[in-house]
Image (cartoon, rainbow, N blue to C red):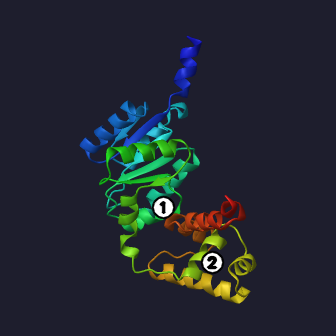
Amino acid sequence: MRNDRVDARRVRRAAVVEESVLQRTRAAQLLANDLKLEVVHTGATLPMFMAWLKRTDRTRWPHLLVLDLPTDVDPPRDLDLIAALRDAGMRVLVLSALRNRSAARRLVELGIDAVVSTSDGEDEFLLAADAALAGGTMITARAQATIHGADQTLRLSRQEERALALYASGLTIAEVAERIGVRHDTARKYLKRVRDKYTVIGRPARSKLELARIAWAEGYLVAESDRAVRSSPATAAG
């Protein structure tokens, strides 16, 4: 009996918030059957889920929340709620048609755990859910294309990309300048141009943290890391 209780505590739990009954039911089935999660709540809206949380013991809260992003989402209110849930230790996977691109971009910049488009297959959904539960992040290619489709006119120069990636990775402006071989003032100008370009398309980055979120969401941090690995002496020697 004691082992049964221990195993029960180790069972991972999930909740699904989705307006479509059909999609909500199928998502719950996949989580239960393929990932062996205990689905403790399914509902149509985020307020309904929050009401359920208030009357539910914290030991029964889900580890993973699968959440739709409705077209009429209220960004300040709903994004604050999602941030609070993540602060409470809940992993959040957005499964949505992503018609509200502005809200979706904000979620990505906030560091949401996973984003899956409803155009993706069930395998991608399961991979994203598994990655989120493991503490990782995943944004599918279709979700990326949908979220950033309106931003395709934004172009950073090669030096602007490098300055953004290095600065967002934690370097100072002086260190960025040294790394890319330019003067301090020039590196500062590159970063100002980056901020200005993102401000024009409605994604202002007033702080270093906000720039880092953009760099992560756009893949610049990964790209710079890959370049560093490829150019390292150990890699060249290998």
On the image, numbered disc 1 is attached to which residue? 108
Instruction: Tell me what residue is drawn at x 44 percent, y 49 percent.
Output: 93
Q: Position of residue 19 (x, y in %)?
A: 29, 48
Q: Which mark is residue 186?
A: none
Mark 2 residue crowding within 10 angstroms, few (<14) / some (14–19) / many (20+): many
Question: Residue lying furthest left in this view?
Answer: 22
Question: Residue lying furthest top in this view?
Answer: 1
Q: Is residue 188 above or below residue 207?
A: below
Secondary structure category for the residue under label 2: helix
On the image, numbered disc 2 is attached to which residue? 163
Instruction: Tell me what residue is drawn at x 29 percent, y 54 percent.
Output: 119
Q: Work out how far the residue at label 2 is from the one at label 1, CA to CA, in angstroms.
A: 21 Å
Secondary structure category for the residue under label 1: helix
Q: Position of residue 120 (x, y in %)?
A: 32, 52
Instruction: Tell me what residue is drawn at x 50 percent, y 46 percent.
Output: 132
Q: Nearer the viewer, residue 230 or 18?
A: 230
